[in-house]
Image (cartoon, rainbow, N blue to C red):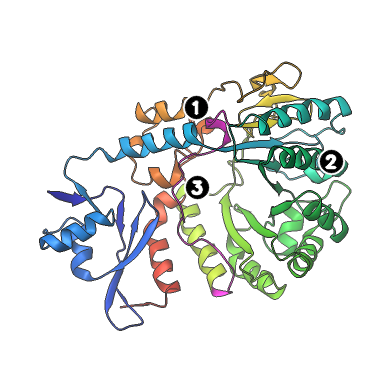
């Protein structure tokens, strides 16, 4: 006997498909697959009467029906455990400096001048070399992170030369990405990072159109960065065919209403390109209080839909629905990833270095750590916590897509559930519209 998977979401709205028939959108969250199904199938997946045997078997093969009594959360959590245990990929999140050139009011980090020392780089290079020569990994990924990583540009170039040489000598694939505010990027630096440093993906934050962004993310020296960042991105699209971008917008009370203006500005700047992906994000507490500027959960869910719809209207690239399950929620839950702070401390979580009150959460230092995976951190038990229903996530229907969101926030007493939990029906509608369907 079969029953609908607990991870199947059936859209509420019927649509007319371009081919003429009526469909409803369906998401299978455990696989992140989306289907446009006929009304009879939609009714079955919503809990209706069983279909003929051949139709039932076809829906079972697609993962939309499961055998009655299946413990689906157990399978999802087991998959998370396997993804951590079996990975052939090692990740280093490297913070080359503790300085940032911006003064964002919602930031929870504390920034001080100074970069890493040559001795620090030698220790990190030795650890990296031991990793790539261990035989345990096929790929090593380096994420340049901050503070503002481009404030440590010289450190990035030096370490990139060392890392790529070590990876090449070991026959291990090397990949690099960066999270940056973009204000210190220029064509010359990008060419060096892309060429010598093998940088292939960059994430920047633009908090709305020019005036809103420059007010939200002012430079410490005064002035704004919006025009510069957009100009650099547009130039990079012409110069580097294989360099991709993600544009994050931190959405709060001050810019929630600016979705259409922002999307129009991005399209007008030439950023309606498949190599540039856009997404809105709720303001996030990093050990600080953002309650005065963050949207409440219901409003953020509605606002996210407005931003996604605006992206789509203006031809920008965005993920209307998740495109893959989140088997490993973040670097904090796997010993095959570590965060290297500017002072040589090793952390499991990106939201601990430079954040007041969290410096003592380091798991080791470059000077003392043994070769091998990162020493265990406080969130490496996350799969066990999910299985024990520590947070209530085990029974949540978006668990495969969310992974529990943020272990750190849960254990600090916050509820970090994403807007997706509250607006999935609306996102299914947006998906159907993007496929050329018309609502009935």
* Mark 1 residue crowding within 10 angstroms, few (<14) / some (14–19) / many (20+): few
- For label 3, the SS is loop
In depth, the one of 116 and 388 nearer the eye is 116
Q: CA distance from mark 3 to mark 2?
A: 36 Å
Tell me where residue 31 appears, x and y as whole percent: 38, 51
In percent of width and height, residue 428 lies at 38, 63
What's the magenta region?
313-336
Task: From this view, report whether residue 431 is shown above or below residue 325.
Answer: below
- Residue 236 appears left or right of 63: right
Q: Which residue is mark 2?
A: 152
Tell me if residue 400 comes above or below residue 126 in the rendering.
Answer: below
Residue at x 30% of width, y 84% of height = 20
CA neighbours of label 3 inside 10 A, class few (<14), some (14 to 19), many (20+): few
Sequence order check: which comes first, mark 3 or mark 2? Answer: 2
Indicate whether residue 317 is drawn in magenta: yes
2 or 1: mark nearer the eye: 2
- The tag earlier along the polypeptide, 2 or 1, is 2
Q: Are marks 2 and 1 in contact (CB under 8 Å)?
A: no
Asked whether 64 falls inside the magenta stretch, the response is no
Residue 164 sits above or below residue 339 on the image:
below
Determine whether 271 is above or below 109 in the image: below
Viewer-side residue, 191 vs 427: 191
Looking at this view, name the residue that lies furthest to the top: 368
Q: Quadrant of the C terminus?
A: bottom left
**Hey, which quadrant is residue 14 in on the image?**
bottom left
**Does label 1 or label 3 sit earlier along the sequence?**
3
Question: Residues under labels 1 and 3: Cα distance?
Answer: 20 Å
Please name the residue that numbered disc 1 is placed on: 411
């Amino acid at each position: 006997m079969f029953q609908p998977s607990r991870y199947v979401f059936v859209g509420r709205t019927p649509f007319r498909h371009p081919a003429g028939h009526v469909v409803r959108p369906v998401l299978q969250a455990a696989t992140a697959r989306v289907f446009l199904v006929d009304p009879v199938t939609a009714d079955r997946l919503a809990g209706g009467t069983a279909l003929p045997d051949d139709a039932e078997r076809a829906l079972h093969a697609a993962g939309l029906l499961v055998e009655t009594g299946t413990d689906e959360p157990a399978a999802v959590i087991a998959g998370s455990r396997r993804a951590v245990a079996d990975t052939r990929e090692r990740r280093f999140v490297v913070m080359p400096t503790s300085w940032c050139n911006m003064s964002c009011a919602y930031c929870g980090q504390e920034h001080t001048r100074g970069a890493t020392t040559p001795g620090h780089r030698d220790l990190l290079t030795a650890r990296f070399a031991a990793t790539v020569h261990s035989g345990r990994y096929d790929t090593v990924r380096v994420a340049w992170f901050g503070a503002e990583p481009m404030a440590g540009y010289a450190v990035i170039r030096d370490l990139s030369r060392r890392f790529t040489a070590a990876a090449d000598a070991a026959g291990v694939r090397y990949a690099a990405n960066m999270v940056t505010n973009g204000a210190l990027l220029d064509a010359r630096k990008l060419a060096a990072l892309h060429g010598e440093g093998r940088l292939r993906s960059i994430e920047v934050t633009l908090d709305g159109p020019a005036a809103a962004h420059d007010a939200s993310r002012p430079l410490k020296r005064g002035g704004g960065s919006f025009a510069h960042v957009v100009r650099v991105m547009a130039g990079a699209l012409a110069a580097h065919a294989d360099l991709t971008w993600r544009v994050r917008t931190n959405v709060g009370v001050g810019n929630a209403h600016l979705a259409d203006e922002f999307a129009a500005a991005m399209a007008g700047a030439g950023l309606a390109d498949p190599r540039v992906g856009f997404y809105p994000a709720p303001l996030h507490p990093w050990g600080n209080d953002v309650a005065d500027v963050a949207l409440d959960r219901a409003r953020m869910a509605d606002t996210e839909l407005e931003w996604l719809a605006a992206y789509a209207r203006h031809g920008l690239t965005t993920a209307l629905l998740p495109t893959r399950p989140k088997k490993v929620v973040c670097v904090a839950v796997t010993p095959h990833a570590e965060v290297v702070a500017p002072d040589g401390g090793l952390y499991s979580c990106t939201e601990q270095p430079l954040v007041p009150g969290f410096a003592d959460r380091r798991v080791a230092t470059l000077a003392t750590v043994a070769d091998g995976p990162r020493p265990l951190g406080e969130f490496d038990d996350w799969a066990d916590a999910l299985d024990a229903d520590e947070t209530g996530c085990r029974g949540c229907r978006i668990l495969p897509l969310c992974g529990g969101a943020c272990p750190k926030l849960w254990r600090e007493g916050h509820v970090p559930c994403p807007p997706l939990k509250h607006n999935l029906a609306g996102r299914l509608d947006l998906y159907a519209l993007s496929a050329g369907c018309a609502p009935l």
